[in-house]
Amino acid sequence: MEAAEYIDSQTRDFFGQLKEWLAIPSISADPARHDDVRASAGWLAAHLSGIGFPVVEIWETGEAGAPGLPAVFAHWPAADPAAPTVLVYGHHDVQPVEPLDEWDSPPFEPAERDGQLLGRGASDDKGQVLLHSLGLRACLAAGGPAREAPPVSLKFLIEGEEESGSPHFAGLLRSRAAQLGCDVIVISDTTMWAADVPSMCIGMRGLLDAEIDVYGPDGDLHSGSFGGGVPNPLHALAGLLAGLHDADGRVTLPRFYADVLPLSSAERELFARLPFDEKAWLAEAGHSQAAAGEAGYTTLERIWARPTAEINGMWGGHTGPGPKTIIPREAHAKVTFRLVANQDPADVAAGLREYVAAHTPPGIDATVTFGGPGVRPCFSPIDAPAVQAARQSMALAFGKEVLFTREGGSGPEADLADILGAPLVFVAVGLDADRIHAPNEKVEMDLLLKGAEAVAYLWDKLAAVHL
């Protein structure tokens, strides 16, 4: 039986199973739903055991006194002990659902509508996790009666805290590294360009957040008596923030671009072939009036492959009604940096401290604090054997050429690659239009089936290449 034929025969059962899983409100950010996150892990573990995985375990996270939420691990060894090992990563927790009154149907009562499946987690990420189950069974069916195991050794790691920032994930990876050893990691938690333009993500930006606090006099001063004679913290902060970029939109922190991986000409050419309508994109971006950013790059290149510095908020002094003629005692700002391949959040943090120290005027004290160590970026070269195998598999399933994208968001993918020492491959069929994290999240049902078909081909192709 061909893989596509098998998938077609299993469509009703597949969506019935997905609806069961989507009905479990596994919201990791809500302590009142933590039992539901555990129920979600239990559902997935039972499902994976039911389709034939000989090893299925629920892994607790956190520490004694500070427990986390469970991940699900499964392992199905290949018949050939020399076959490569592939780890599939995804998550079974979901985002909160508020505001409830903006949902067209209850978020945990999955509903079909015009070829779409609506419900929290339909796209992010339960639907994209479960397509692997169907794809694996299709791969086994296509191999004939003699195929009783996948052509690669398959491991699944489906975590339960991704929507809460994966606080225990790096620790889990380190403590379980021996069991999670693999040759390549397949991620199914991203999006394609469009339903009729299949694409693969090859990188995600990292993130560093910081607060800059600026202090001047011990208390607010009368501007008539002291204005023009003492430093003004708001003026100093405004200068610091304005100086973060030069006239070409480049970030001015020391060494900020030292390790940035340049865009290859091949990648720029493939980005340019995407049907990008900048005017329509600006309309979707809150009806912004113009594109802006680092000179010499297109909008897609800026938001995917170039690092940024953004001012997220600033405050200080009098902000109430009417005038208040003061020199304020302090001023504050929150800033974030999106990082790209080869940048390290720690290096950027050091550069920001140096920049603030060098540009703070006399008479002003400035401090920089960070919300955490930051999230590292990740990147997969388009010519990597595993990436090419995945591209060929998706092209077979969709019947057309597969292009490449990157994503501006951040996740735990860099920890996976660094701790396990394996390259990443992104195989996903979500869409930006799926309204992930928003009311009325949905997934295109036919795309989930195409994704299952793609991974059915992928395991044979990865078994045939040198990883």
Image (spheres, rainbow, N blue to C red):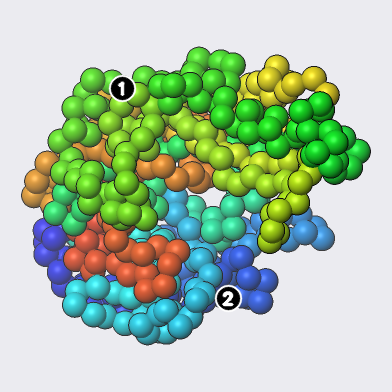
SS of the residue under disc 2: helix
Vertical placement of residue 391 versus 70, above or below: above
Check the picture and name the quadrant holding the C terminus.
top left
Q: What residue is rendered at 35% in x and 24% in y?
A: 295
Give the spatial CA distance, label 2 vs label 1: 49 Å
Q: Residue at point 48% right, 32% down?
A: 308
Q: Which residue carries the number 2 mark?
A: 36
Q: Is residue 100 visible?
A: yes
Residue at (15% x, 44% y) in the render: 275
Return the residue nearer the eye: 373 or 47.
373
Specify the farthest residue to the right.
218
Q: Nearer the viewer, mark 2 or mark 1?
A: 1
> Does residue 39 appear to the left or right of 65 in the view shown?
left
Q: Going by the picture, which residue comes out furthest to the front?
A: 224
In the image, 240 versus 355, the foreground residue is 240
Q: Position of residue 196 (x, y in %)?
A: 14, 54
238 relative to 144 in the view: left or right: right
In front: 216, or 342? 216
Would you name the residue on which mark 1 appears? 296
Which image quadrant: the N terminus?
bottom left
Looking at numbered disc 1 in the image, what kind of residue is underneath it? Gly
**Camera-side residue: 115 or 366?**
366
**Residue type for callout 2:** Asp
Q: Would you call the spot at circle 2 few (<14 residues within 10 Å), some (14-19), or many (20 or more)? A: some
Q: Is residue 82 left or right of residue 177?
A: left
Against 373, residue 229 (above or below) is above
Q: Earlier in the sequence, mark 2 or mark 1?
A: 2
Residue 80 seen anywhere in this rendered image of the structure = no
Residue 12 % position (x, y): 23, 78
Q: Quadrant of residue 271?
A: top left
Residue 145 image-quadrant placement: bottom left
| x, y percent for residue 234 | 70, 37
